[in-house]
Image (cartoon, rainbow, N blue to C red):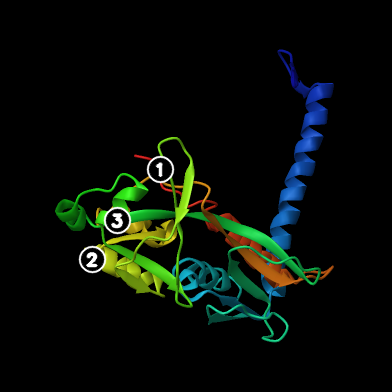
Amino acid sequence: VRLFARTTRSLTLTAEGALFYEHCLRALAEIKSAETLLDSGKQSVSGRLRVSMPVLYGRMCVAPLLTEFASGYPNLTLELLFSDRVADLAEDRLDLVIRTGSLPDSSELAARRLRVHRMVACASPAYLAQRGIPLTAEDLSQHKVINYAHAGKPQRWTIPDEHGVRHAFTPASYMLMDDLEAIAQATKAGFGIAMLPCWLVDNAIAQGELVRVLREDRENIYETHAVWVHSPHMALKVRLAVDMLVSKLPTSMSLPND
């Protein structure tokens, strides 16, 4: 497509060139308008943004992003609450709740998925050097398992066999704890094998403090959602915070296969 008509004395736009030029002008005007809208949005985001989240996941993954987000809005006050109980948006006067796991159906609430993470079995290099590397679920009977327990009930593990068939079971536990971070610390110290979320142990695995064992069950996933009270007019501060979390939290924390 020719945009210019050139002679020895002049350079003019062709019909196609003139049309292209007009579209470019409109596009530049739209960009300028969008920049102006962003600047005005920073001024209109104000008041208090009150967010509840699980203690460990919130502290490690969500809070750093929200504090960075709030720093861009001088008229916004950020209030973060850390609790592993299921918060009530209305009763606790919350703008936003971060929840892990499945969500109940509700016409009063709206939600958006933030990320999906998977569980990974791991142990320290020192432990594996002493006890050997388990290859199957049956091998765990010869190992020390550090398991998570909620309300005294041990977590069930799901491990696929060499044919991809998933086997769910509750391993005999050498230690039971109701705190994931304590389990991770005990595992790194060489006390046993644990099943932990990737977001908690991916750095330790990358640095060689922990080693993945057994086959990863890619169907054993946990979803994280942002939840707020349903309204036809979503508050700008809530919408911007949710958009930011969706864009910056990884959609999956599955570690690559060896």
Q: For the view shown, which residue lies furthest in the left direction? A: 130
Gap between marks 3 and 2, in whole Å?
Answer: 15 Å
- Indicate left or right for 136 with 112 as reference: left
Q: Amino acid at mark 2?
A: Phe
- Pinpoint residue 163: horizontal percent, then vertical percent: 45, 35
Residue at the far top: name it: 8
Snapshot quadrant of residue 4: top right
Q: CA distance from mark 1 to mark 3?
A: 27 Å
Give the CA separation, mark 1 to mark 2: 25 Å
Q: In the shown orientation, is residue 214 left or right of residue 142?
A: right
Q: Which residue is mark 3?
A: 141
Residue at image mark 1: 256
Q: Earlier in the sequence, mark 1 or mark 2?
A: 2
The three-letter code of the residue at mark 1 reads Pro
| Residue positioned 73% across, 69% down in the render | 236
Q: Kindly indicate whether the residue at mark 3 contacts the one at mark 1 (C-beta within 8 angstroms).
A: no
Q: Position of residue 14 (x, y in %)?
A: 81, 21
